[in-house]
Amino acid sequence: MKILMLGNSFTYANDMPAMLAEITGAEVAQITRGGARLAEQTNPNTRLGKKNFAALEEEHWDYVVLQEMSNGPITARTSFMKSVSTLCEMIRDAGAVPILFATWAYRRGAEQYEEVNLDYDGMAAVLSEAYRQAAEENGALLADVGRKFYEAGGAEELYAEDGSHPSEAGSRLAAGTIAEVIREHQGAGRPVDNLTVPKVNTGDIRLRVLYMYQILLKYTDAEHPLTTNQIRDLMEKTYGITMHRTTVPGDIEVLKAAGFDIVGHRYRQNKYYLESRQFELPELKILIDAVESSRFITERKSRRLVEKLVALTNARNAGQLKRSLYTSGRVRSANEKGYYIVDAINTAINEGRKISFFYTDYDGRKKQVLRNDGNAYTISPFTLIWNGDFYYLVGYDHAKESVRTYRVDRILKQPEILAEEALPVPDDFDVTRYTREVFRMYANQEPEEVTLICRNEVMKGIIDQFGMDVKVRKADQEHFRTKVRVCVSPTFYGWVFTWGGDVKIEGPENVLAGYREMLGKALQE
Protein backbone atom coordinates (compact mmCIF):
# COMPACT_ATOMS: atom_id res chain seq x y z
CA MET A 1 0.00 0.00 0.00
CA LYS A 2 1.27 3.49 -0.88
CA ILE A 3 0.18 6.71 0.84
CA LEU A 4 0.99 10.26 -0.30
CA MET A 5 0.65 13.14 2.18
CA LEU A 6 0.16 16.75 1.02
CA GLY A 7 0.44 19.46 3.66
CA ASN A 8 2.81 21.54 5.78
CA SER A 9 4.63 21.38 9.10
CA PHE A 10 1.53 19.98 10.84
CA THR A 11 2.11 16.91 8.66
CA TYR A 12 5.88 16.59 8.72
CA ALA A 13 6.45 17.59 12.38
CA ASN A 14 7.99 14.76 14.41
CA ASP A 15 8.22 12.77 11.17
CA MET A 16 4.55 11.84 11.39
CA PRO A 17 4.61 10.18 7.90
CA ALA A 18 7.13 7.67 9.32
CA MET A 19 4.74 7.01 12.23
CA LEU A 20 1.93 6.32 9.75
CA ALA A 21 4.21 3.99 7.80
CA GLU A 22 5.10 2.15 11.01
CA ILE A 23 1.45 1.67 12.00
CA THR A 24 0.14 0.64 8.57
CA GLY A 25 3.16 -1.07 7.06
CA ALA A 26 2.62 1.15 4.02
CA GLU A 27 5.08 3.11 1.93
CA VAL A 28 4.42 6.75 2.86
CA ALA A 29 5.71 9.77 0.93
CA GLN A 30 5.13 13.48 1.53
CA ILE A 31 5.04 16.72 -0.48
CA THR A 32 5.16 19.41 2.19
CA ARG A 33 6.50 22.87 3.02
CA GLY A 34 6.23 24.91 6.20
CA GLY A 35 3.19 27.22 6.04
CA ALA A 36 1.96 25.72 2.73
CA ARG A 37 -1.67 25.92 1.69
CA LEU A 38 -3.45 23.30 -0.40
CA ALA A 39 -3.87 25.89 -3.17
CA GLU A 40 -0.16 25.51 -3.92
CA GLN A 41 -0.68 21.80 -4.58
CA THR A 42 -3.24 22.61 -7.27
CA ASN A 43 -0.91 24.91 -9.23
CA PRO A 44 1.65 23.12 -11.44
CA ASN A 45 3.71 26.33 -11.60
CA THR A 46 4.59 26.19 -7.89
CA ARG A 47 7.31 23.94 -6.48
CA LEU A 48 4.84 21.87 -4.49
CA GLY A 49 2.31 21.78 -7.31
CA LYS A 50 4.89 20.59 -9.82
CA LYS A 51 5.90 17.73 -7.52
CA ASN A 52 2.27 16.86 -6.76
CA PHE A 53 1.22 16.73 -10.42
CA ALA A 54 4.23 14.55 -11.26
CA ALA A 55 3.57 12.21 -8.32
CA LEU A 56 -0.10 11.70 -9.22
CA GLU A 57 0.59 11.21 -12.92
CA GLU A 58 3.70 9.04 -12.73
CA GLU A 59 3.15 6.86 -9.64
CA HIS A 60 0.38 4.71 -8.20
CA TRP A 61 -1.07 5.68 -4.82
CA ASP A 62 -3.75 4.00 -2.73
CA TYR A 63 -4.50 6.99 -0.51
CA VAL A 64 -3.64 10.70 -0.67
CA VAL A 65 -3.93 12.69 2.57
CA LEU A 66 -4.76 16.42 2.36
CA GLN A 67 -3.96 18.89 5.17
CA GLU A 68 -4.73 22.61 4.91
CA MET A 69 -2.87 25.41 6.73
CA SER A 70 -3.91 25.54 10.40
CA ASN A 71 -6.46 28.37 10.10
CA GLY A 72 -7.04 28.13 6.32
CA PRO A 73 -10.57 26.66 6.52
CA ILE A 74 -11.51 29.65 8.71
CA THR A 75 -9.69 32.62 7.19
CA ALA A 76 -9.85 31.47 3.53
CA ARG A 77 -12.78 29.07 3.37
CA THR A 78 -13.59 29.60 -0.30
CA SER A 79 -10.00 28.87 -1.33
CA PHE A 80 -9.93 25.83 0.96
CA MET A 81 -13.13 24.35 -0.51
CA LYS A 82 -11.99 25.01 -4.08
CA SER A 83 -8.58 23.44 -3.46
CA VAL A 84 -10.09 20.33 -1.88
CA SER A 85 -12.49 19.94 -4.80
CA THR A 86 -9.70 20.23 -7.38
CA LEU A 87 -7.34 17.90 -5.53
CA CYS A 88 -10.00 15.26 -4.84
CA GLU A 89 -10.77 15.05 -8.55
CA MET A 90 -7.08 14.80 -9.43
CA ILE A 91 -6.63 12.07 -6.81
CA ARG A 92 -9.57 10.03 -8.09
CA ASP A 93 -8.39 10.41 -11.66
CA ALA A 94 -5.07 8.92 -10.50
CA GLY A 95 -6.93 5.92 -9.05
CA ALA A 96 -6.42 6.84 -5.38
CA VAL A 97 -8.73 7.63 -2.45
CA PRO A 98 -8.60 11.16 -0.91
CA ILE A 99 -8.44 11.55 2.89
CA LEU A 100 -8.90 14.93 4.58
CA PHE A 101 -6.61 15.35 7.60
CA ALA A 102 -8.68 17.73 9.77
CA THR A 103 -6.35 19.64 12.08
CA TRP A 104 -6.93 20.96 15.61
CA ALA A 105 -7.62 24.22 17.38
CA TYR A 106 -4.68 26.05 18.91
CA ARG A 107 -3.90 25.32 22.56
CA ARG A 108 -6.27 27.08 24.95
CA GLY A 109 -5.20 30.67 25.52
CA ALA A 110 -2.65 30.67 22.70
CA GLU A 111 -1.69 34.04 21.17
CA GLN A 112 -2.70 32.82 17.69
CA TYR A 113 -6.41 33.17 18.53
CA GLU A 114 -6.14 36.86 17.71
CA GLU A 115 -5.70 35.84 14.04
CA VAL A 116 -9.02 34.02 13.85
CA ASN A 117 -11.13 36.03 16.35
CA LEU A 118 -12.34 32.79 17.98
CA ASP A 119 -11.77 30.97 21.25
CA TYR A 120 -10.69 27.32 21.64
CA ASP A 121 -14.19 25.83 21.47
CA GLY A 122 -15.19 28.03 18.53
CA MET A 123 -12.09 27.24 16.47
CA ALA A 124 -12.43 23.51 17.13
CA ALA A 125 -16.07 23.56 16.01
CA VAL A 126 -15.48 25.63 12.86
CA LEU A 127 -12.50 23.53 11.74
CA SER A 128 -14.37 20.27 12.26
CA GLU A 129 -17.44 21.56 10.39
CA ALA A 130 -15.38 22.91 7.47
CA TYR A 131 -13.48 19.67 6.95
CA ARG A 132 -16.67 17.63 7.35
CA GLN A 133 -18.45 19.71 4.68
CA ALA A 134 -15.47 19.46 2.33
CA ALA A 135 -15.33 15.69 2.79
CA GLU A 136 -19.07 15.25 2.18
CA GLU A 137 -19.14 17.47 -0.91
CA ASN A 138 -16.20 15.68 -2.49
CA GLY A 139 -16.82 12.11 -1.35
CA ALA A 140 -13.53 12.03 0.59
CA LEU A 141 -12.67 10.10 3.74
CA LEU A 142 -12.32 12.22 6.88
CA ALA A 143 -9.63 11.76 9.52
CA ASP A 144 -10.89 14.24 12.13
CA VAL A 145 -7.73 14.56 14.19
CA GLY A 146 -8.94 17.90 15.52
CA ARG A 147 -11.92 16.20 17.15
CA LYS A 148 -9.57 13.67 18.77
CA PHE A 149 -7.61 16.60 20.26
CA TYR A 150 -10.87 18.17 21.45
CA GLU A 151 -12.14 14.93 22.99
CA ALA A 152 -8.86 14.73 24.88
CA GLY A 153 -9.73 18.10 26.40
CA GLY A 154 -7.00 19.89 24.46
CA ALA A 155 -4.42 18.18 26.65
CA GLU A 156 -1.18 20.14 26.99
CA GLU A 157 0.94 17.11 26.12
CA LEU A 158 -0.53 17.02 22.58
CA TYR A 159 0.99 20.42 21.69
CA ALA A 160 4.50 21.65 21.04
CA GLU A 161 5.78 24.72 22.90
CA ASP A 162 4.36 27.16 20.31
CA GLY A 163 0.79 26.07 21.10
CA SER A 164 -0.11 25.23 17.51
CA HIS A 165 2.18 22.45 16.25
CA PRO A 166 1.79 18.92 17.58
CA SER A 167 4.11 17.33 20.09
CA GLU A 168 5.33 13.81 19.39
CA ALA A 169 2.26 12.52 21.22
CA GLY A 170 0.04 14.75 19.07
CA SER A 171 1.66 13.51 15.86
CA ARG A 172 1.25 9.91 16.97
CA LEU A 173 -2.44 10.58 17.68
CA ALA A 174 -2.78 12.06 14.17
CA ALA A 175 -1.05 9.08 12.55
CA GLY A 176 -3.24 6.67 14.50
CA THR A 177 -6.42 8.51 13.49
CA ILE A 178 -5.49 8.42 9.79
CA ALA A 179 -4.54 4.73 10.07
CA GLU A 180 -7.90 4.00 11.72
CA VAL A 181 -9.76 5.64 8.82
CA ILE A 182 -7.77 3.55 6.32
CA ARG A 183 -8.46 0.39 8.29
CA GLU A 184 -12.21 1.07 8.31
CA HIS A 185 -12.15 1.82 4.59
CA GLN A 186 -10.21 -1.37 3.82
CA GLY A 187 -12.57 -3.54 5.85
CA ALA A 188 -14.11 -3.23 9.30
CA GLY A 189 -12.42 -5.28 11.98
CA ARG A 190 -9.26 -6.07 9.99
CA PRO A 191 -6.10 -4.96 11.86
CA VAL A 192 -4.09 -2.25 10.18
CA ASP A 193 -0.95 -4.37 10.37
CA ASN A 194 -2.58 -6.89 8.05
CA LEU A 195 -2.57 -4.28 5.29
CA THR A 196 1.15 -4.86 4.80
CA VAL A 197 1.82 -6.35 1.37
CA PRO A 198 4.66 -8.87 1.17
CA LYS A 199 7.51 -7.86 -1.11
CA VAL A 200 7.79 -9.79 -4.39
CA ASN A 201 11.13 -10.49 -6.02
CA THR A 202 11.28 -8.84 -9.44
CA GLY A 203 12.70 -12.06 -10.88
CA ASP A 204 9.69 -14.08 -9.75
CA ILE A 205 8.45 -16.32 -12.60
CA ARG A 206 4.89 -15.10 -12.02
CA LEU A 207 5.93 -11.51 -12.64
CA ARG A 208 7.92 -12.48 -15.73
CA VAL A 209 4.85 -13.92 -17.44
CA LEU A 210 2.75 -10.89 -16.50
CA TYR A 211 5.43 -8.53 -17.79
CA MET A 212 5.45 -10.38 -21.10
CA TYR A 213 1.68 -9.94 -21.35
CA GLN A 214 2.13 -6.19 -20.72
CA ILE A 215 4.64 -6.01 -23.58
CA LEU A 216 2.33 -7.86 -25.97
CA LEU A 217 -0.56 -5.64 -24.91
CA LYS A 218 1.39 -2.41 -25.38
CA TYR A 219 3.35 -3.10 -28.55
CA THR A 220 1.59 -5.70 -30.69
CA ASP A 221 -1.35 -6.38 -32.95
CA ALA A 222 -1.88 -8.48 -36.09
CA GLU A 223 0.04 -5.97 -38.20
CA HIS A 224 2.84 -5.47 -35.68
CA PRO A 225 3.97 -8.79 -34.16
CA LEU A 226 7.17 -9.08 -32.12
CA THR A 227 9.92 -11.61 -32.71
CA THR A 228 11.38 -13.70 -29.92
CA ASN A 229 14.49 -11.52 -29.80
CA GLN A 230 12.43 -8.32 -29.78
CA ILE A 231 10.46 -9.62 -26.79
CA ARG A 232 13.70 -10.54 -25.02
CA ASP A 233 15.13 -7.07 -25.67
CA LEU A 234 12.01 -5.32 -24.37
CA MET A 235 11.91 -7.52 -21.25
CA GLU A 236 15.49 -6.61 -20.44
CA LYS A 237 15.16 -2.93 -21.34
CA THR A 238 11.81 -2.38 -19.61
CA TYR A 239 11.93 -4.74 -16.63
CA GLY A 240 15.59 -5.72 -16.31
CA ILE A 241 14.80 -9.40 -16.89
CA THR A 242 17.17 -11.46 -19.04
CA MET A 243 15.51 -14.37 -20.85
CA HIS A 244 16.85 -17.25 -22.92
CA ARG A 245 15.27 -17.52 -26.38
CA THR A 246 13.78 -20.92 -25.48
CA THR A 247 12.00 -19.42 -22.45
CA VAL A 248 9.81 -17.09 -24.52
CA PRO A 249 7.70 -19.81 -26.22
CA GLY A 250 7.12 -21.51 -22.86
CA ASP A 251 5.84 -18.31 -21.25
CA ILE A 252 3.64 -17.65 -24.29
CA GLU A 253 2.07 -21.08 -23.76
CA VAL A 254 1.39 -20.21 -20.11
CA LEU A 255 -0.47 -17.06 -21.23
CA LYS A 256 -2.46 -19.02 -23.81
CA ALA A 257 -3.36 -21.65 -21.23
CA ALA A 258 -4.67 -18.83 -18.99
CA GLY A 259 -7.06 -17.79 -21.78
CA PHE A 260 -5.16 -14.91 -23.39
CA ASP A 261 -5.56 -14.82 -27.17
CA ILE A 262 -1.89 -14.87 -28.17
CA VAL A 263 -1.17 -15.75 -31.80
CA GLY A 264 2.22 -17.06 -32.93
CA HIS A 265 3.56 -17.48 -36.47
CA ARG A 266 6.69 -19.40 -37.45
CA TYR A 267 9.07 -17.50 -39.71
CA ARG A 268 12.86 -17.54 -39.57
CA GLN A 269 12.05 -16.31 -36.08
CA ASN A 270 8.79 -16.92 -34.27
CA LYS A 271 6.55 -13.85 -34.09
CA TYR A 272 3.80 -13.22 -31.57
CA TYR A 273 0.97 -10.74 -31.05
CA LEU A 274 -2.12 -10.23 -28.90
CA GLU A 275 -5.13 -10.90 -31.12
CA SER A 276 -8.24 -9.82 -29.23
CA ARG A 277 -8.78 -6.62 -27.25
CA GLN A 278 -11.71 -5.06 -25.44
CA PHE A 279 -12.06 -2.39 -28.12
CA GLU A 280 -11.18 -2.26 -31.78
CA LEU A 281 -9.42 0.85 -33.08
CA PRO A 282 -12.52 2.31 -34.85
CA GLU A 283 -14.54 1.83 -31.64
CA LEU A 284 -11.97 3.74 -29.63
CA LYS A 285 -11.94 6.52 -32.24
CA ILE A 286 -15.71 6.90 -31.89
CA LEU A 287 -15.47 7.00 -28.09
CA ILE A 288 -12.69 9.61 -28.18
CA ASP A 289 -14.65 11.75 -30.63
CA ALA A 290 -17.70 11.54 -28.35
CA VAL A 291 -15.67 12.58 -25.31
CA GLU A 292 -13.96 15.47 -27.07
CA SER A 293 -17.26 16.71 -28.49
CA SER A 294 -19.19 16.59 -25.24
CA ARG A 295 -20.13 19.91 -23.68
CA PHE A 296 -21.01 18.22 -20.38
CA ILE A 297 -17.43 17.03 -19.78
CA THR A 298 -14.96 19.72 -18.72
CA GLU A 299 -11.72 20.32 -20.65
CA ARG A 300 -9.54 18.82 -17.93
CA LYS A 301 -11.70 15.73 -17.47
CA SER A 302 -11.89 15.31 -21.25
CA ARG A 303 -8.10 15.20 -21.53
CA ARG A 304 -7.82 12.58 -18.80
CA LEU A 305 -10.56 10.42 -20.32
CA VAL A 306 -8.89 10.50 -23.72
CA GLU A 307 -5.60 9.47 -22.12
CA LYS A 308 -7.33 6.47 -20.53
CA LEU A 309 -9.00 5.51 -23.81
CA VAL A 310 -5.70 5.74 -25.70
CA ALA A 311 -4.15 3.41 -23.12
CA LEU A 312 -6.60 0.68 -24.17
CA THR A 313 -4.69 0.06 -27.41
CA ASN A 314 -1.05 -0.56 -28.25
CA ALA A 315 1.59 2.15 -28.57
CA ARG A 316 1.63 2.01 -32.37
CA ASN A 317 -2.10 2.70 -32.63
CA ALA A 318 -2.09 5.40 -29.95
CA GLY A 319 -0.87 7.98 -32.46
CA GLN A 320 -3.80 7.26 -34.76
CA LEU A 321 -6.19 7.92 -31.90
CA LYS A 322 -4.77 11.38 -31.27
CA ARG A 323 -6.66 12.68 -34.22
CA SER A 324 -7.60 16.31 -34.87
CA LEU A 325 -11.24 16.70 -34.02
CA TYR A 326 -12.20 20.38 -34.36
CA THR A 327 -13.89 21.46 -31.16
CA SER A 328 -12.11 24.79 -30.67
CA GLY A 329 -14.33 27.43 -29.12
CA ARG A 330 -16.93 24.87 -28.12
CA VAL A 331 -18.67 25.91 -24.91
CA ARG A 332 -18.09 23.34 -22.18
CA SER A 333 -19.45 22.88 -18.69
CA ALA A 334 -17.46 24.48 -15.87
CA ASN A 335 -18.88 22.09 -13.25
CA GLU A 336 -15.96 19.79 -12.34
CA LYS A 337 -18.23 17.78 -10.01
CA GLY A 338 -20.42 16.54 -12.89
CA TYR A 339 -19.09 12.99 -12.72
CA TYR A 340 -19.82 12.65 -9.04
CA ILE A 341 -23.25 14.27 -9.33
CA VAL A 342 -24.18 11.69 -11.99
CA ASP A 343 -22.77 8.90 -9.83
CA ALA A 344 -24.83 10.00 -6.81
CA ILE A 345 -28.02 10.19 -8.89
CA ASN A 346 -27.39 6.71 -10.32
CA THR A 347 -26.84 5.37 -6.82
CA ALA A 348 -30.12 6.89 -5.62
CA ILE A 349 -32.00 5.43 -8.61
CA ASN A 350 -30.55 1.96 -7.97
CA GLU A 351 -31.32 2.14 -4.25
CA GLY A 352 -34.79 3.62 -4.74
CA ARG A 353 -34.07 6.71 -2.59
CA LYS A 354 -35.06 10.36 -2.80
CA ILE A 355 -32.36 12.97 -3.39
CA SER A 356 -32.00 16.57 -2.31
CA PHE A 357 -29.98 19.19 -4.20
CA PHE A 358 -29.57 22.89 -4.91
CA TYR A 359 -30.23 24.06 -8.47
CA THR A 360 -28.57 27.09 -10.01
CA ASP A 361 -29.04 29.76 -12.65
CA TYR A 362 -27.12 32.89 -13.68
CA ASP A 363 -28.10 36.50 -13.24
CA GLY A 364 -27.32 39.41 -15.57
CA ARG A 365 -23.80 39.76 -14.17
CA LYS A 366 -22.96 36.09 -14.87
CA LYS A 367 -23.13 35.39 -11.14
CA GLN A 368 -24.33 31.94 -10.18
CA VAL A 369 -27.52 32.12 -8.11
CA LEU A 370 -29.73 29.52 -6.45
CA ARG A 371 -33.20 28.84 -7.78
CA ASN A 372 -36.26 27.93 -5.71
CA ASP A 373 -35.58 30.89 -3.38
CA GLY A 374 -32.38 29.21 -2.25
CA ASN A 375 -34.19 26.10 -1.02
CA ALA A 376 -33.19 22.56 -1.91
CA TYR A 377 -35.28 20.46 -4.30
CA THR A 378 -36.46 17.06 -3.10
CA ILE A 379 -36.83 14.67 -6.01
CA SER A 380 -37.67 11.02 -6.61
CA PRO A 381 -35.23 10.33 -9.47
CA PHE A 382 -36.60 8.32 -12.40
CA THR A 383 -33.82 8.34 -14.96
CA LEU A 384 -30.88 10.21 -16.47
CA ILE A 385 -31.11 11.27 -20.11
CA TRP A 386 -28.33 12.40 -22.45
CA ASN A 387 -29.79 14.97 -24.79
CA GLY A 388 -28.29 17.80 -26.83
CA ASP A 389 -24.78 17.37 -25.34
CA PHE A 390 -26.01 17.50 -21.75
CA TYR A 391 -27.17 15.13 -19.00
CA TYR A 392 -30.63 15.68 -17.57
CA LEU A 393 -32.27 14.28 -14.48
CA VAL A 394 -35.93 13.34 -14.84
CA GLY A 395 -37.81 12.82 -11.61
CA TYR A 396 -40.86 13.60 -9.50
CA ASP A 397 -40.70 16.97 -7.74
CA HIS A 398 -42.51 16.47 -4.43
CA ALA A 399 -43.07 20.20 -3.84
CA LYS A 400 -44.57 20.83 -7.29
CA GLU A 401 -46.21 17.37 -7.43
CA SER A 402 -45.21 16.75 -11.03
CA VAL A 403 -42.49 15.18 -13.18
CA ARG A 404 -39.71 17.69 -13.85
CA THR A 405 -36.42 17.90 -15.72
CA TYR A 406 -33.14 19.29 -14.39
CA ARG A 407 -29.85 19.83 -16.22
CA VAL A 408 -27.19 17.97 -14.26
CA ASP A 409 -24.38 20.50 -14.75
CA ARG A 410 -26.59 23.13 -13.11
CA ILE A 411 -26.89 21.10 -9.90
CA LEU A 412 -24.63 22.93 -7.45
CA LYS A 413 -22.91 19.97 -5.80
CA GLN A 414 -23.25 16.25 -5.23
CA PRO A 415 -26.89 15.56 -4.26
CA GLU A 416 -27.67 14.22 -0.81
CA ILE A 417 -29.17 10.72 -0.93
CA LEU A 418 -32.01 10.72 1.58
CA ALA A 419 -33.18 7.82 3.73
CA GLU A 420 -36.74 8.18 2.41
CA GLU A 421 -37.89 5.78 -0.28
CA ALA A 422 -38.42 7.38 -3.69
CA LEU A 423 -41.72 7.39 -5.51
CA PRO A 424 -41.58 4.43 -7.94
CA VAL A 425 -41.43 5.14 -11.67
CA PRO A 426 -44.99 4.97 -13.03
CA ASP A 427 -45.70 1.93 -15.19
CA ASP A 428 -46.82 4.13 -18.08
CA PHE A 429 -43.71 6.35 -18.01
CA ASP A 430 -42.06 6.16 -21.45
CA VAL A 431 -38.62 7.77 -21.57
CA THR A 432 -38.56 8.07 -25.36
CA ARG A 433 -41.97 9.73 -25.51
CA TYR A 434 -41.16 12.00 -22.59
CA THR A 435 -37.95 13.18 -24.26
CA ARG A 436 -39.81 14.20 -27.39
CA GLU A 437 -42.58 15.91 -25.44
CA VAL A 438 -40.21 17.95 -23.31
CA PHE A 439 -38.55 19.04 -26.56
CA ARG A 440 -34.82 18.83 -26.01
CA MET A 441 -35.23 19.34 -22.27
CA TYR A 442 -35.23 23.11 -22.24
CA ALA A 443 -38.44 23.66 -20.32
CA ASN A 444 -40.34 22.36 -17.31
CA GLN A 445 -43.87 23.25 -18.37
CA GLU A 446 -46.45 20.54 -18.80
CA PRO A 447 -46.37 19.20 -22.40
CA GLU A 448 -49.38 19.96 -24.56
CA GLU A 449 -50.55 18.92 -28.00
CA VAL A 450 -49.74 21.34 -30.83
CA THR A 451 -50.88 21.07 -34.45
CA LEU A 452 -48.35 22.04 -37.12
CA ILE A 453 -48.78 22.68 -40.84
CA CYS A 454 -45.55 21.87 -42.67
CA ARG A 455 -44.25 21.93 -46.22
CA ASN A 456 -43.46 18.48 -47.58
CA GLU A 457 -39.76 19.36 -47.81
CA VAL A 458 -39.37 19.57 -44.01
CA MET A 459 -40.52 15.98 -43.33
CA LYS A 460 -36.94 14.98 -42.58
CA GLY A 461 -36.68 17.68 -39.93
CA ILE A 462 -39.94 16.56 -38.31
CA ILE A 463 -38.73 12.94 -38.21
CA ASP A 464 -35.36 14.01 -36.82
CA GLN A 465 -37.09 15.89 -34.04
CA PHE A 466 -40.05 13.66 -33.19
CA GLY A 467 -39.11 10.22 -34.52
CA MET A 468 -40.40 7.88 -37.21
CA ASP A 469 -43.61 7.13 -35.32
CA VAL A 470 -44.83 10.74 -35.52
CA LYS A 471 -48.31 10.77 -37.07
CA VAL A 472 -48.78 12.87 -40.21
CA ARG A 473 -51.56 13.32 -42.77
CA LYS A 474 -51.85 15.20 -46.01
CA ALA A 475 -53.10 18.78 -45.79
CA ASP A 476 -52.82 19.65 -49.51
CA GLN A 477 -50.46 18.92 -52.39
CA GLU A 478 -47.60 20.86 -50.83
CA HIS A 479 -48.22 20.50 -47.10
CA PHE A 480 -48.84 17.90 -44.39
CA ARG A 481 -50.37 18.25 -40.94
CA THR A 482 -49.01 16.71 -37.73
CA LYS A 483 -49.85 16.79 -34.03
CA VAL A 484 -46.96 16.71 -31.57
CA ARG A 485 -46.69 16.96 -27.79
CA VAL A 486 -44.13 19.56 -26.71
CA CYS A 487 -43.30 21.88 -23.85
CA VAL A 488 -44.41 25.21 -25.30
CA SER A 489 -41.47 27.50 -24.63
CA PRO A 490 -39.21 30.02 -26.39
CA THR A 491 -37.07 27.08 -27.48
CA PHE A 492 -40.02 25.49 -29.27
CA TYR A 493 -41.01 28.81 -30.84
CA GLY A 494 -37.39 29.36 -31.90
CA TRP A 495 -37.35 25.96 -33.58
CA VAL A 496 -40.53 26.83 -35.50
CA PHE A 497 -39.03 30.17 -36.54
CA THR A 498 -35.84 28.57 -37.94
CA TRP A 499 -37.91 26.95 -40.69
CA GLY A 500 -38.67 30.36 -42.18
CA GLY A 501 -42.41 29.81 -42.60
CA ASP A 502 -42.16 26.20 -43.80
CA VAL A 503 -43.47 25.10 -40.40
CA LYS A 504 -46.51 26.96 -39.04
CA ILE A 505 -48.49 26.61 -35.83
CA GLU A 506 -52.13 25.87 -36.53
CA GLY A 507 -53.33 25.51 -32.96
CA PRO A 508 -54.31 25.60 -30.23
CA GLU A 509 -55.03 29.31 -30.16
CA ASN A 510 -53.14 30.01 -26.93
CA VAL A 511 -49.93 28.55 -28.43
CA LEU A 512 -50.40 30.57 -31.62
CA ALA A 513 -51.03 33.71 -29.53
CA GLY A 514 -47.88 33.04 -27.50
CA TYR A 515 -45.84 32.75 -30.71
CA ARG A 516 -47.21 36.06 -32.01
CA GLU A 517 -46.47 37.72 -28.68
CA MET A 518 -42.87 36.48 -28.68
CA LEU A 519 -42.33 37.71 -32.25
CA GLY A 520 -43.82 41.08 -31.32
CA LYS A 521 -41.49 41.47 -28.36
CA ALA A 522 -38.52 40.60 -30.55
CA LEU A 523 -39.47 43.36 -33.01
CA GLN A 524 -39.95 46.02 -30.35
CA GLU A 525 -37.23 48.64 -30.13
Image: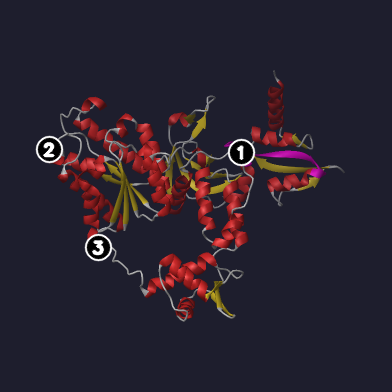
Q: Give the spatial CA distance, label 1 vs label 3.
A: 52 Å
Q: Secondary structure at mark 1?
A: loop
Colour treatment of the image: secondary structure
Secondary structure type for disc 2: helix
Which numbered disc, 2 or 1, marks the residue that appears first in the sequence? 2
Q: Quadrant of residue 43?
A: top left
> Cα distance, mark 3 to mark 2?
33 Å
Foreground: 357 or 314? 314
Residue in the picture at 58% in, 55% down: 287
**In which quarter of the view is residue 328 placed?**
top right
- Where residue 353 appears, x then y in whole percent? 42, 48
Residue flagged by tag 1: what amino acid is it? Answer: Gly
Identify the residue at image location x=58%, y=61%: 317
Of the 4 image quadrants, the one containing the C terminus is top right
Which three-letter amino acid code belongs to the residue tagged 2?
A: Glu
Residue where numbered disc 2 is placed: 156
Image vertical order of residue 88 relative to residue 58, above or below: above
Closer to us: 409 or 63: 63
Residue under the image location 32 percent in, 50 percent down:
4
> Label 1 crowding class (10 Å Cα cut-off): few <14, some 14-19, many 20+?
few
* Residue at the far right in the pictured view: 477
Circle 3: residue type: Asn
* x and y, in percent, of residue 193 in the image: 23, 60
**Residue 490 visible (yes or no):** yes
The image shows residue 473 at horizontal and vertical percentages of 79, 46
Q: Is residue 430 visible?
A: no
What residue would you read off at disc 1?
A: 329
| Tag 3 residue | 194
Tell me the magenta residue range. Answer: 439-457
Q: Which mark is drawn over residue 131?
A: none
